[in-house]
Amino acid sequence: MKTVKVYITLKQGVLDPQGKAVQESLNKLGFPEVHGARVGRFLELQVDEHADIDRQIKEMCAKLLANPVIEDYQYTIEEGVAQ
Amino acid sequence: MKTVKVYITLKQGVLDPQGKAVQESLNKLGFPEVHGARVGRFLELQVDEHADIDRQIKEMCAKLLANPVIEDYQYTIEEGVAQ
């Protein structure tokens, strides 16, 4: 079994109102040193050993996990099951 | 300027219906090798250089970014502005 960690972020240039709200809230809460925030998604998948796991993950991202029009994704593959 | 990446995940044992839905959808889409999925959040913050940046980030997480009752968080601090 492998643990696949997928990080999905908005592409550069795509407006991120949620991130803007986080930044403004942090500023108001007493953290004026925060100058920008972008919000993304983080997925942890438990996947069987597979000969072509890279291709499978790219297909999963294209079909379901990420929106290729406005989002980028990165992933890491780790041995074993995450804690 | 530093880039702080914050990964927020549900604690072990906390039910994750969104993750369950992702797993079932992947299974139906032709990926039976996926045996589990957990969904979390991923934040990228641009933060001014700060003497006590670790303490600041923990405070941000406790006050706004994460729900300490059901969520765990991890973070990394990187030099410069993320692409």
Image (spheres, coloured by chain):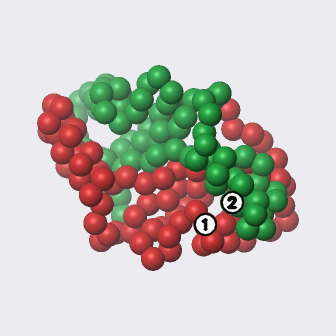
Chain colours: A green, B red
Q: Position of residue A25 (x, y in %)?
A: 69, 60
Depth check: A38 or B79 in front?
A38
Tell me the subunit letter for badge 2: A
Tell me the subunit letter for badge 1: B
**Mark 1 → mark 2, Cα distance in angstroms:** 8 Å
Q: Which residue type does callout 2 highlight?
A: Ser
Tell me the quadrant of the picture where the C terminus of chain A can be found.
Answer: bottom left
- Residue most extreme to the top: A69
Q: Secondary structure at mark 2?
A: helix
Whether residue B13 appears in this view of the structure is yes
Q: Quick check: marks 1 and 2 in contact, CB under 8 Å?
A: yes
Q: Nearer the viewer, mark 1 or mark 2?
A: 2
The label shown at residue B8 is: none
For label 1, count other residues whose C-alpha is less than 10 Å away and answer few (under 14), some (14-19) or many (20+).
few
Q: Is residue A52 left or right of residue B70?
A: left
For label 2, count other residues whose C-alpha is less than 10 Å away and answer few (under 14), some (14-19) or many (20+).
some
Q: Which residue type does callout 1 highlight?
A: Leu
Which residue shows up at 42% across the image and 42% down it? A6
Q: Position of residue B9 (x, y in %)?
A: 44, 60
- Residue assigned mark 2: A25
Looking at the image, is B74 positioned above or below residue A76?
below
Whether residue B58 appears in this view of the structure is no
Q: Position of residue B70 (x, y in %)?
A: 42, 72
- Residue most extreme to the bottom: B69
- Residue assigned mark 1: B64
Q: Position of residue A70 (x, y in %)?
A: 51, 27
Q: Is residue A11 left or right of residue B53?
A: left
Looking at the image, is B53 positioned above or below residue B25?
below
Which residue shows up at 73% across the image and 67% down it? A29
Which residue shows up at 63% across the image and 71% down it? B63
Q: Is residue B1 left or right of residue B37?
A: right
